[in-house]
Structure formats: C-alpha cells, structure tokens
Image (cartoon, rainbow, N blue to C red):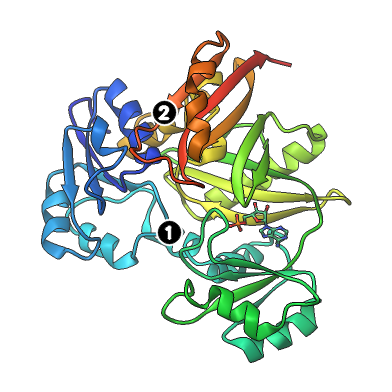
Amino acid sequence: MLAPGATIGILGGGQLGRMTAQAAARLGFTTHIYSTEPESPGAQVTPYVTIAALDDAEALARFAASVDVVTYETENIPLSTLDAILPLAPVRPGLEVLRVAQDRLREKDYLRSIDVATAQYREVTGPEALGRAIRDLGHRAVLKTVRMGYDGKGQVMITPDINPIQAWAAIAGAADSAGLAILESFVDYRCEISVVVVRGANGSLANYPAVENQHANHILDTTIAPARIAPELAMRAEAISRHIAERLDVIGVLAVEMFVTHDDEILVNELAPRPHNSGHWTMDACYTSQFEQLVRAVAGLPLGSTERHSDAVMKNLIGNDIDRWREAVGEPMTKLHVYGKLEARPGRKMGHVTRLLPRH
Ligand code: AMP
C-alpha cells in the first residue's frame, strides 16, 4: 500500500490525467505526468512533468525510476512503452487489458470469448475484403479503423450508395500500419449506456450505476445519471461490466460502453481501461469520484464508496461551448470544470458542467 508522499506516474497529460492528478493531490500523493505535448491540461496541475516521445527509452527509464506506480489516461499507448517501464515500476491497470482495449478487433474477439454479446463484425484488410464483409453483414454498417480511433475519428458509415473503394479510402489515412479495419453491423439502438467499474489491488470490485450517453457528431455530448432504463436492464449492464473487469484482472477503472437495442439486448461497443468522460459526473454526485477510485486502486488503498448522493446531468463543453462558462458558474446547483486548454478548436473537449438533481 502506498502512503501519502508516494509518486504516481501518469502516461498522458489530457483532461483525464489532469483530473487524476487533482484527485491524487487531495490524498497527499505526488504525480509525475509523462506527455508528448509541450503544453497540456495535466502539466498545469502536477509538480513533475516529462515531455518526450512514447518511444524515448531514456526518458521512459528516468520517468519509471522516479515514480512508485504508473497508470495511463489513454489507451493509445504503444505496448512497447509499457514494456520499457515494467522492469522499473508496476503499471496499473496492466498490459493485457491495454492490449485488448486498444484494438477494436482484439476487443470484440475477447468479448465474444468470455460470452459477452457485441454487434456482428468482420475483419477487413482492404476494399475487396470490405465488399465481401458488406455482402455478409448488409449495407447498414460502420467501418472503423482497428486502432487509434476515438470520438468518431477513423470511422465511416456504410450506406447502400457508398462503394467499398470510397469507404476504404475514407479511413485509409487513419488505418494503422497493418492496414486493418473492422466492419460492424449498424446497431439500431434505443439508447447508449455505460458503466464505470472500479477494481482494487486486492480484487475488490464496485461499480457506478449505468448511465445514459447522448452523442453529437460522434462525440459524447450529455450523460444522464442514472440511465432512464428499467432496473433489470441496468443490473444486467452492471453485471456484464463487472464480469469484464474481473476477467481482464483490471486494477483501476474500466468503462464499458454499451448499446441497448429495441428488444432489450445489451451489446458491448467499447472498453476503456481508464477514467471515462461518461464518469465525470461522479466527481460531483458521488461520495468518491472515478478519479479518486483510480488513485486508490493503483496505490493499493481500499476503494471508496461508489454510492451517489445526487442524480446528475453532465454536459461537455466542446469548442466554443466553453464561452458559456459564465452562465454555468452562476448556477448554484451546477458544477463547472474547465480543463485549461489554450485554444478552443471545434470538436475539442474544453470542459464540462454537471447539474446536480435530487436523488431518485
Ligand atoms: P465508438 O468510437 O465505437 O465509441 O463509436 C462512436 C459512436 O458512433 C458510438 O457512441 C455510436 O453512437 C456510434 N456507433 C459506433 N458503432 C456503432 C454501431 N455498430 N452501430 C451504431 N452506431 C454505432
């Protein structure tokens, strides 16, 4: 068990790294953020920062030697980066969950192997394979790069009037070096939900309630906590998510994104072995936030309570939405979070607001 004063290393300096560092500081831990960007939201709130490439062996070794444990705030980290750190510092969650979560194909194969339902999918290696996969799965489908996709990047909707060559070209620039992609059946879902599961170093497991997520332009716009679904469905989603966290032996936080279909089927879409945007509401509406849980788990402390004292609606402030901070800060039951990013580019997550409501 790490004691206050110990140092937690965080790979990535985005808003998730920033909010993890803030939670760590509250418990008396020091943080050291390793970021590829010279200026980052995380760097503003941590005493130690390394700015270097993810394949800089010397910088990684110095970073690893200066911390007591390492965690990450993004799944877009080469496994070789963790390999370089592991002889010098433990990494939590571990390598295996990252290996699964950073590759959409491996992720779906893994989920199926542990009896978790997903959309139908096919591996796609080029325009001819895509043509065959479309004939197999039908014309309503989504083509995604296997790696490095997030917030709708590296995705194209397949429609009857798009030809495979065009569709492949649309994602080819973003496809990983292996040129691999995945075609998924389009899920005509009733709603999108997610569950954030936390698992301690001793295997203790807890989850926040299932929440409902609304996207705009493929980016999370609003999270409604708890989800407006039947209790039986919420319990099923929570059980699926806990099952995945246990099987992957996660120490830390795992977010599980799911579709709820019109026939009340739950299909898992994506895993994120880190704090998740759909868990930001926990900072203000729960006794322990997802960020504090991550710190507790990686430090070997007991988990906190995942109970909520309030219901909540979290809204992202994307791009110029951040100009509405004045309005948000004037509402007494709304909590404003600003990430400190210098430039409000379109599609960029600049902050979020959480409106607290009486618990039902
Ligand atoms: P992802 O990057 O996989 O999280 O996808 C981003 C968003 O695109 C999801 O939250 C959904 O709104 C939509 N989406 C992704 N995959 C599918 C699918 N197979 N069927 C329908 N919508 C999807």
In screen coordinates, is 304 left or right of 315? left
Residue found 17% across the figure and 47% down from its top = 50
Q: SS at mark 1?
A: helix
**Furthest-right residue in view?**
263
Query: Looking at the figure, which quarter contains the N terminus?
Result: top left
Extreme-bottom residue of the structure: 128
- Residue ID for mark 2: 338
Amino acid type at circle 2 is: Val
State the mark number for residue 109.
none
Residue 284 appears at what percent x and percent y? 51, 20
Q: Is residue 201 visible?
A: no
The residue lying at 44 percent from left, 25 percent from top is 337
Q: Is residue 338 left or right of residue 48?
A: right
Image location (x, y in percent) of residue 73: 38, 46
Q: Nearer the viewer, residue 199 or 213?
A: 213
In the rendered view, tell whether residue 55 sits above or below residue 89: below
In what element is the residue under mark 2? strand
Say which quarter of the image contains residue 10: top left
Lower sequence index among marks 2 and 1: 1
**Residue at the disc numbered 1:** 98
Residue 75: image x %, image y %?
A: 42, 56
- Ligand 1 quadrant in view: bottom right
Q: CA distance from mark 2 to mark 1?
A: 28 Å
Amino acid at dot 1: Leu
In the image: residue 111, left or right of residue 251? right
Circle 2 Cα neighbour tier, 10 Å, few/some/many (<14 / 14–19 / ≥20): some
Q: Is residue 163 visible?
A: yes
* Quarter placement of the C terminus: top right
Q: Is residue 277 above or below residue 352?
A: below
Q: Nearer the viewer, mark 2 or mark 1?
A: 2
Residue 242, compared with residue 109, is above or below; it is: above
